[in-house]
Amino acid sequence: MVTDNIKADVNKINHILAGYKGESNLLIQVLLEIQKEIRWLPKEGLLRISQELNVPLRQVYHAVTFYKAFSLIPKGKYTVTVCMGTACHVRGSPRILDRVAQTLGINPGETTADSKFSLETVACLGCCAMGPVMVVGDVYHGKLSLDQVGRILDSYN
Amino acid sequence: MPKLRSAPELEELRKVIVSKRDPNKLCFTVCSGTACLAIGSQKTFAAFEKELERPGLKDTVELKATGCPGFCEQGPIVVVYPQEVCYLHVQPEDVAEIISQSMKGQIVERLLYVDPVTRKAISRESDIPFYQYQKRLILGNNRLIDATRIEDYVALGGYEALAKALIWMTPEQVMAEIEKAGLRGRGGGGFPTARKWKSTRDAPGEPKYVIVNCDEGDPGAFMNRALMEGNPHSVLEGLTIGAYAMGSHEGFIYVRQEYPLAAENIAIAINQAEDYGLLGKNILGSGFDFIVKVHKGAGAFVSGESSALMNAIEGKVGEPRPKYIHTAEKGLWDKPSCLNNVETWADVSFIINNGADWFATIGTEGSKGTKIFSLVGKVNNTGLVEVPLGTPLRDIIYKIGGGVRGNKKFKAVQTGGPSGGCISEQYLDSPVDFDELTKLGAMMGSGGMIVTDEDTCMVDFAKYFVHFLSEESCGKCVPCREGLNHMLDVLTRITEGRGQASDIQLLEDLAKMLKGASLCALGQTAANPVLTTLRYFRQEYDAHINEKRCPAGICKDLIAFYIEPDKCQACLVCARNCPADAINGGKNIIHVIDQSKCIKCGTCFDVCPPRFGAIKKISGEPVPAVVPEQDRVIQRKG
């Protein structure tokens, strides 16, 4: 079952890679596109990327582990991103993060057992006037209070 | 569409666009920047679209999704032209009323801005104090433009500066104009732009590259996002002019992936500019060729550093290169490269259009022009603020920002991003320019301005920045990697009540080492938050270390929450909301916090009805003993 899933993901990766043969300078852009499409970067996929773009696997791995946007394990259906920027920080984002973590039962960087939610923090989303801010999937929620957190997350159930 | 082949053709296009527009036509604009989208401006816009579908309306009125006007606090914002009536917090259910009243020439009073001092409603956008005291050179057009329509930009005189530069000026003349204007880089360092351009132009090697840095990584800053989303052509135009001056034919725009809308809008802008022949081969018939590509970042603060950013564009990991090699000489693919911030590029067309002399009349001796600041944190009017350089901090925070929220006491303003510094009240009258801020131990940075009040613990605040930087340090050089971690350890133990008297000296020593030995600016400036808080808020460090007390009541290990028995009315609100089940009590039984269970999240403190105000935050003293069981029953009369 698991290998089938990986196969399907590698197929999608092959499909994306078709347009980028030998374009080594587009490594990051390709990784972003793949991460967005299948929500992770499987080992088999990294090998394909290395071959197709003509970039050493070491360099691919370096990029994947360096940037925050990439994940070597599958991400949940919805990524919950809590902004930890300075403006959000002074308006109580650490408490928002605690509450989200408690509600979902996971720590930042982790994914719920049902693969529904992944919890992430971000340095700044640039919505500083709306702080504290969290994004679920691609929907922004601004001016958050602690009691809204549960309600918002519930609405995805 | 036919490509424009000369400056007169551009002028002709502008005339045609303008002639088709009736300045007296009723026009509704809805802010569609990310911040307004975060609080539902999409729904407001959709409500307008739906209402305007009614017969007869479509031709008589216009609807426009515009960029961010900066007054994010009050969004979603709707402005009705030609009267320029500004409505705040507009919800979908308000839309029908706005349309019907506007058509009658009436105003919806309840949605206007009310001056907190005079209690008077203000209808015209530009009369609102938040806007009144600004000089909105670069940001001003955001609210008039739909970023996805190049015609909107052209109608306002867009690309006229490009035509002027390409047709009437030599590259040397463009360079001289920028130099005379005294433009300095808006991204952080404040390096003279013309000097950077000259080094790139004069460096041997072809091709030369020009780059827009929109990796706005500083938490608390979002002016680049607003510009890229709201007026991408102004950046493209400046970039093209710069490329002409330096003899470059290829440009890159590096946008962080956290700004999806900015990346989308700039890509649209590039396509449209190409369609009109404002990018590509033989621009406006001048013989000058220039193409631009967009690259997305993947989430790394250090990638905003110029040499790191160039590595990232090459598809490598965004780590800085050794600084003895200048990127102006060996940058992207080891070719001469010039990187400037979004705002710097946007300044260029204003200088070319209006002349260096005009530009140099704005600002101070050493810092010319305007600067956009993102005024955020504990201030009433948060948002983007553009003022002439040299404006005193106090004017920005009080006149434009409307002062500190909730009548709390001002404590400090933090400028310059994570590597900037905290400035205390006594220096509020200092003019904000590159040199003054540096003198105060802070810096301009990209223009983040975070206001803090009495509820912010400055040790915790310094720890926040050091934590941020230690996470973002790429780890390539030892001083930054290890120094920041060590600093974080020390700050953590101070905030946890395990600080020692020698820690202050240790922090100062580490700061000196970081500054002197780090590879790039991230490490070199990383100690600023610690040094400035030590300089202006030393007493807070002392309280943490000597008295094990957090004066602001923030550091979890040094505070406790306690319910004052004589104030508690046993309403159960705190007990129901406590996420840790740490409050016991019942109807008519005074509530008590079980200190062993309390996670100090502060929820009880927030939810206790203000008329009771029974929850007390204590620090530096023991928690009073629990009321004996028999005294916990509240006897109510009647």
Image (tube, grey):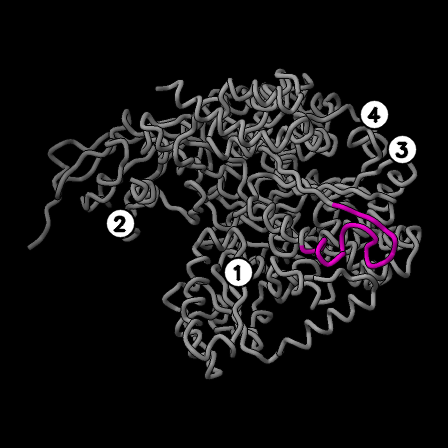
- Secondary structure under badge 3? loop
Q: Disc 4 vs disc 2: which is toward the camera?
A: 4
How crowded is the residue under tag 4: few (<14 C-alpha within 10 Å), some, or many (20+)? few
Residue type at mark 3 is: Gly
The earlier-in-sequence mark between 3 and 2 is 3
Residue wearing tag 2: B612
Residue wearing tag 1: B31
Residue wearing tag 4: B324
The earlier-in-sequence mark between 4 and 2 is 4
Residue wearing tag 3: B205
The earlier-in-sequence mark between 4 and 1 is 1
Q: Disc 4 vs disc 1: which is toward the camera?
A: 1
How crowded is the residue under tag 1: few (<14 C-alpha within 10 Å), some, or many (20+)? many
- The answer to whether tags 4 and 1 share a subunit is yes
Instruction: Residue at the far left: name it.
Output: B638
Asked if the magenta segment contains residue B331, the reply would be no
Residue type at mark 4 is: Tyr
Pointer 4 and pointer 1: residues touching (CB < 8 Å)? no
Residue type at mark 1 is: Cys
Asked if the magenta segment contains residue B285, the reply would be yes
The earlier-in-sequence mark between 3 and 1 is 1
Q: Which residues are magenta?
A: B272-291
* A118 left or right, relative to B191: left
Q: Disc 3 vs disc 2: which is toward the camera?
A: 3
Q: Disc 1 vs disc 2: which is toward the camera?
A: 1
Q: CA distance from mark 1 to mark 2?
A: 41 Å
Task: Please say whether residue B546 is visible from this viewpoint.
Answer: no
Q: CA distance from mark 4 to mark 2?
A: 63 Å
- Location of the N terminus of chain B by quadrant is bottom right
